[in-house]
Amino acid sequence: MAVRRRQRLGPGGGRALLAAVLVCLWGRAAAERVRYAIPEELGRGSLVGPLARDLGLSADELPARKLRLSDEKQYFTVNEENGNLYVNERLDREEMCGESATCSVSFEALVHNPLNIFHVEVAIEDVNDNSPVFSKPALELEITELTVPGTRFPLEMARDADAGSNSQLTYELSSNPSFSLILDDNPGGKKQPELVLEKALDREMQSSFELVLTAVDHGDPSRSGTVQVRINVTDANDNQPVFSKRVYEARATENLPAGSLVLQVMATDADAGSNGQVFYSFSNVPEGFRRLFTVDSDSGEVRVVGPLDFEEKNKYIFSLEATDGGGLTSHCEVQIDITDENDNAPEITILSLSSPVPEDAPVGTVVALLKVRDRDSGENGQVSCELSGEAPLSIVASSGGSYKVVTTGALDREQASEHGVTVVARDRGRPALWSSRELVLEVSDVNDNAPVFEEAAYSAYVAENNAAGALVLRVQARDADAGANGRVSYWLAGGSAGAAGAAPLVSVEARSGALYAQRSLDYEQCREFTVAVRAQDGGSPARSSTATVRVFVLDRNDNAPRVLWPAAAAAAGEAAGGAATPFEVVPRSAEAGYLVAKVVAVDADAGRNAWLSYELVQASEPALFRVGLHSGEVRTARAVSERDAAKQRVVAVVKDHGQPALSATATLHVVLAESLQEALPELSERPAGAEEAAAAAAELQFYLVLALALLSALLVLSVALAVLARLRRAGPPAVLRCLGAQRFSLAGAAFPADFCEGTLPYSYNLCVAAPARAVPEAAWPPPPPPVPVLSAEELLGGDFCEKPSSNSSAIEGEVSAQPDLPQVCKTVSTYYSP
């Protein structure tokens, strides 16, 4: 089972606590660091530790929190169901960390809802899986026979790739009476095997020896490696090379160019000749060292031949060997420290990006998690981050080189649907290096805008008599939102488009906003109306706005002029069976310009369609009369002569100014006579049947009068006196009253029905002849009772136009009760609108 260690704040507890409090101000908990330790060489799927439990997550929270690891190289994996951390691939400590004393892998664990980051460190512990290795299959030594017993000969040390106690070696030498083995401590803490000559050699007796040197590590179980030691006994070479130092130290900056000198070693040999000549070489170093450094065999100069990288390895330790011409050797240790240069720009990794973000997200919402790492050390590896670009975002430092990008202001998708910012990471090296990473944050729509009409009030003009379904107007509203939030529909919200309970005059198409007429419009009934159109979007909840549409109905010339006078009176007379035919009396003494009558007409249309003009189209004497073009006044064009017929018929046409023009005709009957009495005979003329009936009646009347005259003069006188007394009480007869100054009006069919629609600036008398009947003159009825006199104000005042007054009804009854009344005199006051 892996060993678990958990650290909450790490070193510098006070500063970490302050940092945690600052981060809490943003609504996020401080990140925790979880540590595990496992041995190397574990198989795939091996358990590392219960990560979810150590992070304080329960099994029920795992599906919602979405525990996962960062996207770096995945040595490990986490189980989504139980939250345990497992090995994802075989781990080789030597391959991962080389000769480093410690080896660990760090990564981040991310959880969501809320978003947070945890730092996890797994220490890889060494396992004794490497045996000691010698660089050569055999060690060759040449020892002169003159060598004094007790002389030491350093042997090559074995190399063990493991760490700690697993790399600590001891040595054993196969048994031989002439040699023994001792171990000497070198400055690096390692054991240096040395071959000790136990007794003098005699080349003539034995010229060579073969021994076995065994290196054993301290692992459990231990591992070992062997090498053959071959000793040749030579003639006297009794001095071995001696280095000036046992340990050589040097510093080299990384990225040194190839061929640069690092250091120079020096060894001397007291022998002369070839036995005193020294040659330098590497002593049992890994092949990787030979790719980075080289040593000159004659001068001992150590130079760089490959690239040095501080981030890969910051210190190199190896051994050099000095060999003289006689085969004697000595060893020294070389330690080269690599100094860092600012050759690595910061690396930015996006751990999480929450995009899109709703535009109503509160200030301080975390939208991204970043990790910034610089492989350099010291100030070269110290990094600061900032955001560039116009966006309501800021970056906040977290623990372990992590950063949070949070919102600093309100987001508005209608102003900017996305925000692009650049994360710039800069180290403190000289010169400073930097790197950048683009972040694009999309903003999702929220229904925060109501539809807006292009105009607050619309005006539309529609000609009357339009076809049902005709387009009236098209309104347009725009919604700055997107998708369903910006999809606008139109509805009628009310107005004066139709009477209560009646169908509306217009309808609106929901998608296009087009207003259509529901039925044909009539200018004379409705000249304008107003409707309210509501635009509503498809959001939830929906937003809406209203615009007013005012529709003006344009007039068309669809109404002909209507003659109020004399057309209405003539029609009434004809409807009564010719009982009353209106006529005008013109004295024969009338001069040119005498006002005969005024044709009064109205037009229900408006504008030019209601401008009326009058024209004389037919007359008994065309040269006798003329009509005013705009006034409708019929006047004499010349003086009346004796040759002119007593009865004249004048026909005038009334036209409007529409396109095309519409017209109506008015017929005037004119009697040329100095007085009404002169006009009566002309009015008594009837057709043939009527004349015969009139003649018979006249003859009968003559005989009756003659008989009465013969009865008695006294009776005549009595009757005459009675009649005169009766007339004195009742006033003059109706015929005489018509000619007098006192006038009265009777309501009857001869009066214009719609005279209230216009006004006349004057009044004139109209007399209508009663139909002739065969009544004897002696049957003259008694005079009618007094009739009240109505003034023009009484005639036109109140609601006289709509219903007859009580006086009018009484008068009409009186007139109808006297069938033999020879004539009825009426005074007509007519008003018209010019």
Image (cartoon, rainbow, N blue to C red):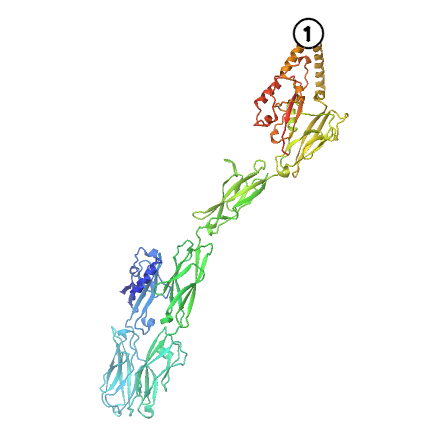
Describe the element under mark 1 as helix, strand or loop: helix
Q: Nearer the viewer, residue 612 or 421?
A: 612
Q: Where residue 763 sits: x, y (%)?
A: 65, 27
Q: Is residue 57 above or below residue 211?
A: above
Kind of residue sitting beneath label 1: Leu
Q: Residue at x 66, y 11 (%)?
A: 721
Q: Is residue 413 above or below residue 291?
A: above
Viewed as shown, does residue 673 lie left or right of 147?
right
Q: Nearer the viewer, residue 63 or 533?
A: 533
Q: Is residue 676 visible?
A: yes
Which image quarter holds the N terminus? bottom left
Outermost residue, right side: 643
Q: Where residue 246 sits: x, y (%)?
A: 30, 83
Which image quarter holds the C terminus? top right
For label 1, the crowd category at 10 Å Cα-Cα, with few meaning under 14, some 14 to 19 and many 20 or more, is few
Q: Where residue 561 sits: x, y (%)?
A: 64, 33
Q: Residue at x 58, y 22 (%)?
A: 807
Viewed as shown, does residue 153 lie left or right of 809?
left
Viewed as shown, does residue 92 lie left or right of 545?
left
Q: Where residue 500 sits: x, y (%)?
A: 50, 35
Q: Residue at x 30, y 68 (%)?
A: 123
Q: Quadrant of residue 618?
A: top right
In this rendering, the count of numbered labels is 1
Q: Quadrant of residue 776?
A: top right
Q: Is residue 603 above or below residue 306?
A: above
Q: Which residue is mark 1?
A: 714
Q: Is residue 46 visible?
A: no
Q: Quadrant of residue 728?
A: top right
